């Protein structure tokens, strides 16, 4: 079941990527608004202590970064397509790095030559935002590091540059803070990823067949209803029922029967296209739907499945080579067809394949409604 295992790993990776982005962008509004608030508070507090030509560009940069993060959040809500996952993650990382750099630069631009209470305000704004980022960004550890290291390392270097014992001691405490926050970030990341894995496992068990790893009937119908409105092609439902499966179980035992079902599931996955959906309905029945306009193409796929099922062997002292497959295909050029209608027609076509001698394909087409 190498194909099914690879497919499951890909699905788990996609699940993690999607939920990571949902977590990051779900926290984006409060995170961006919080950063904007800090920028405005510092700008107001420092307006009487530092030169306007230094404070204004820094403040405007912080406001622009915050607004752009909110625009990104709005865009993500509108377009969450799976092919854009890298774009949304990299965009979030870039904005997070810019925000971290802005915080670190506050130490270099404003810290020197102002009263201690204002220095303390800058210091604690950086510490507070870093602590908050451990909760909002650590789902993607690299994103958290992109914020923490520019903020904190620039601050540590500035403190060290003074060469005074008080500032040196403060820089050492800042180093301890970075180490602790790094550990907190790693632990938070690990916990969130374990939660994602657990929820995926629960979702997988609820939507997949336990034996062969394909979708179960309920999820198959759900996937059909999701994909059908998105296609501009016809739709074909392929219904497969194994021939002589009971004799295989009786001859070689249920373990061999289970292995046969797994191999058939693997054949189905290999035979269809990557975006097509395959499911096990139960027993020795399998089904898939394909969005295409050419019935010859789906018949070719069905014939290929039959050839591969016929080629299955079960070496044993009671060798068995009688396994085959009967397939029924229901096709409609109109994608307004219902799931139940296609399934019923494909099941009937499969039954005709059985009646006409098994190990064959029967195609039934739903005629489009006549225009009056």
Image (cartoon, rainbow, N blue to C red):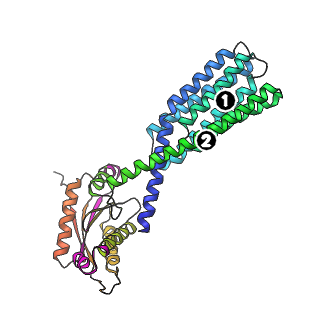
Q: Residue at x 48, y 53 (%)?
A: 13
Residue 212, labelled with which disc?
A: none
Q: Are marks 2 and 1 in contact (CB under 8 Å)?
A: no
Q: Residue furthest bottom?
A: 317
Q: Quadrant of residue 359?
A: bottom left
Image: magenta residue range: 226-255
Which residue is identified by label 1?
103
Badge 1, how many Cα within 10 Å: few under 14, some, many 20+? many
The percent position of residue 278, horizontal first and vertical second, equals: 33, 62
Of badges 2 and 1, nearer the viewer stands 2
Judge from the rendering whether residue 127 lies leftward or rightward of residue 54; answer left or right: left
Query: For this rendering, which residue is in front, 39 or 82?
Result: 39
Query: Is disc 1 placed on a helix, strand or loop?
Result: helix
Q: Is residue 193 magenta?
A: no
Point out the tag, 2 or 1, that comes first from the N-terminus. Answer: 1
Note whether 267 is above or below 24 in the view shown: below
Q: Is residue 238 magenta?
A: yes
The percent position of residue 68, horizontal first and vertical second, equals: 56, 32
Note whether 135 is above or below 360 in the view shown: above
The percent position of residue 29, horizontal first and vertical second, equals: 50, 30
Q: Quadrant of residue 259?
A: bottom left
Q: Residue at x 22, y 64 (%)?
A: 346
Q: Residue at x 18, y 55 (%)?
A: 370
Which residue is identified by label 2?
183
Query: For this rendering, which residue is in front, 158 or 221?
Result: 158
* Quadrant (top left/top right/bottom left/bottom right) for the N terminus: bottom left
- Residue 5 visible in this rendered orientation of the protein: yes
Judge from the rendering whether residue 123 lies leftward or rightward of residue 345; answer left or right: right
The percent position of residue 253, horizontal first and vertical second, equals: 27, 77
């Amino acid at each position: 079941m190498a194909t099914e295992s690879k497919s499951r790993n890909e699905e788990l990776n996609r699940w993690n990527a999607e939920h990571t982005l949902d977590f990051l962008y779900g926290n984006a509004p409060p995170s961006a608004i919080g950063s904007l608030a800090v920028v405005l508070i510092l700008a107001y507090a420092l307006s009487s202590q530092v030169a306007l030509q230094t404070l204004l560009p820094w403040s405007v940069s912080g406001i622009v970064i915050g607004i752009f993060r909110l625009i990104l959040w709005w865009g993500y809500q509108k377009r969450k397509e799976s092919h854009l996952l890298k774009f949304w993650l990299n965009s979030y990382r870039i904005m997070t790095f810019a925000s971290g750099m802005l915080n670190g630069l506050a130490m270099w631009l404003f810290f020197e030559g102002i009263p201690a209470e204002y220095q303390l305000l800058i210091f604690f704004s950086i510490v507070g935002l870093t602590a908050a980022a451990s909760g909002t960004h650590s789902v993607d550890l690299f994103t958290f590091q992109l914020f923490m290291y520019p903020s904190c390392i620039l601050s540590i270097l500035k403190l060290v540059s003074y060469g005074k014992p008080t500032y040196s001691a403060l820089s050492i405490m800042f180093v301890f803070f970075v180490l602790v926050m790094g550990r907190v970030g790693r632990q938070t990341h690990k916990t969130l990823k374990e939660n994602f894995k657990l929820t995926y496992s629960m979702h997988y068990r609820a939507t997949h067949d336990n034996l062969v790893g394909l979708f179960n009937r309920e999820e198959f119908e759900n996937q059909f209803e999701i994909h059908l409105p998105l296609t501009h092609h016809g739709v074909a439902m392929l219904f497969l029922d194994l021939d002589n499966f009971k004799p295989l179980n009786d001859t070689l035992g249920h373990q061999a029967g289970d292995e046969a079902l797994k191999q058939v599931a693997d054949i189905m996955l290999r035979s269809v296209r990557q975006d097509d959906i395959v499911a096990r309905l139960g027993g020795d029945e399998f089904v898939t739907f394909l969005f295409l306009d050419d019935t010859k193409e789906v018949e070719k796929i069905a014939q290929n499945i039959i050839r591969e099922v016929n080629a299955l062997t079960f070496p044993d002292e009671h060798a068995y080579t009688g396994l085959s497959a009967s397939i029924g295909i229901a096709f409609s050029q109109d994608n307004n067809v219902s799931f139940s209608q296609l399934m019923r027609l494909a099941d009937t076509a499969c039954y005709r394949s059985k009646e006409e001698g098994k190990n064959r394909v029967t195609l039934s087409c739903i005629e489009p409604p006549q225009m009056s």
